[in-house]
Image: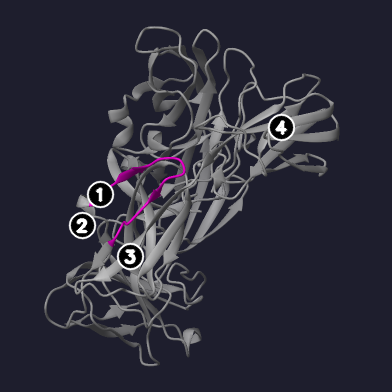
Amino acid sequence: MAARVPLRVGRVAACVGFPVKFRRRLLALIVAVIAIAGCSPSARGDQGSASVFDSSSGRPVSGAAVLLLRQDGTALEAETDSEGRAVFAGLRPGAYSVRVEKPEYIDLMDLPGRGRPIVISAANEPIAVALTHTAVISGQVLDSQGAPVQGAKVIAIVRRSVNGQSRFTPFGEAAHTDDRGSYRLHGLPPGYYSVVVVPYGDDPTAEVFAPAYYGSADPGEAVFFELQPGETRAPVNLMVAGPQAPSLSGRVSGIPGDAHPNGAAVALAARRGLRVPIASVLTDADGAFVMPHVPPGEYQLTAWAPITGRESDGPPAGANARAAARSVSVSGADLQVDLELRPLVKMSGRLVWDSGPNSRFACGGAAQIEFRSEDGWMDVWPPAVAMNGDGFTVEGLPAGRYRVEMPGLGGSCRLAAVRVGDQAAPDGVAQIDGSATVTLVLITATGEISGGVTTQEGKPAPGLVVLSLADGEGAIQVARLDAEGRYRFSDVLAGTYRLMALGSLNSTDYLDALVAPNRGAKLVVVEAGRKVTSDLRLIRK
């Protein structure tokens, strides 16, 4: 899934038998690594067991597959019985990862589905794992005459905050409408979602229409709604504009000789909202292209060569790689737009840790560098990134302004600043043309957050505290409250965070840029080497 959200468990005041658990990606999604800090669940040596239960009802979950994988490759697997219990014989003490799977359920502490670390010791407690019912969104896509639209791509989207602005991020796998215009998005964690429909961009014969959001064609007025565990939200119907008369055509020049006979790829994407291609065509041998029936709107027209495949998100890299883009406004008349391909940028860069070139602080995921265009290119343009120690090179990037992101970083470090040459890039947006080295500054300095949680009646509260970045995307940390309602997060990277105290982890609303503050999330600033005390009230039982 797209934009999956990495989670790690923060240290708590005392070790307890707590279910230690983002597509896609996350929203993709959220792609991530789970890091565990502090107390880990344990099971008795020689024979151990796992207890799997529903996070909402607390009832046992039967028929769940529980996999324990030891670091040496040893694997043990068992299925839960009617009491939600799985027994493992011959279980040796040591470090393991645990993964629990059952259709229509998800482990919110292991959203990537790769397993999460545990320690098997001589303790007697079973491994406790809470599974949450996934949710479903279904409906129809209709045109302005009420006729079903076949072959359209429907995407669930979530909101994330980036530099104080709400950004739409795809979440989960897309669905395609059938001959009745019906779609079904499944396997969604509880949380806040909206839905958008775009043409099936990989099919050049598909009808072209502007992206349509649930509740409005305007992305700024898209309707978001809350999905509860196990809920099926239906009907969530979408309406697209009918066929339009204007066509968009033109000629692409500067196509490299080795691109023949495929010519160049040309894609059309909306400039607002989710910037995904709504039409994709190939030029002929002379570089000519035609996109019929383009609805009025503001778009970005992008072309590139050589062609690496039908997918419009597969741009080229290499000595002969070229690209071009233009903003276009389509009204009621046919439009002719010509594009001239130009060589792509080859850029050099380096990583520094805490403002010093010390690679001993290197952290996982540092090779995953993304460039999100501020000039209207498609959402993420994936160039070829080659790492060499603390240095890296990037090929296949059109010149322009990019927000540089490193979504693969684990919880041990985070991208703090971007510099181009000797100049800082405000808000992480860099003007890249290949003439200057790009420096990415990662921070590893940490602080600590602790405090107590009470109910509305002022009594110590049972439950969890969720720690998430106030702006941007990063690792989510979760700590369980002890018997006195206390929590503690140690080794928290310096930055500004949101804290929410919840009775149970059965929703992802703490990630929503608009919902979380309204839920009563508290902002906390963490400074390197400092301890912060923040007392909270329980938000949701």
Q: Give the residues drawn in magenta, as a range.
A: 222-237
Q: As drawn, is 2 to the left or to the right of 514? A: right
- Mark 4 / mark 2, whichever is N-terminal: 4
Q: Amino acid at mark 2?
A: Ser
> What residue sits right under mark 4 in the picture?
50
Q: Spatial distance from mark 4 to mark 2, Cα to Cα?
A: 47 Å
Q: In which quadrant of the rendered view does residue 141 lie?
A: bottom left
> What residue sits right under mark 1 in the picture?
223
Q: In which quadrant of the rendered view does residue 47 lie?
A: top right
- Mark 4 / mark 3, whichever is N-terminal: 4
Q: Which residue, as the protein is rendered here, is positioned at the far bottom?
A: 285
Q: Residues within 10 Å of mark 3 (few under 14, many from 20)?
A: many
Query: Is the C-beta separation of discs 2 and 1 under 8 Å?
Result: yes
Q: Nearer the viewer, residue 343 or 231?
A: 231
- Mark 3 / mark 1, whichever is N-terminal: 3
| Secondary structure found at label 4 | strand
Q: Which mark is residue 216?
A: 2
Residue at the image position 55 percent from the left and 52 percent from the top? 392
> Percent from the top left, x then y, of residue 11?
58, 20
Q: As drawn, is 238 to the left or to the right of 365? A: left
As displayed, is residue 128 above or below residue 233?
above
Residue at the image position 42 percent from the left and 7 percent from the top? 459
> What residue sits right under mark 3 in the picture?
140
Q: Spatial distance from mark 2 to mark 1, Cα to Cα?
A: 8 Å
Q: Is residue 377 visible?
A: no
Query: Is the C-beta separation of discs 1 and 4 under 8 Å?
Result: no
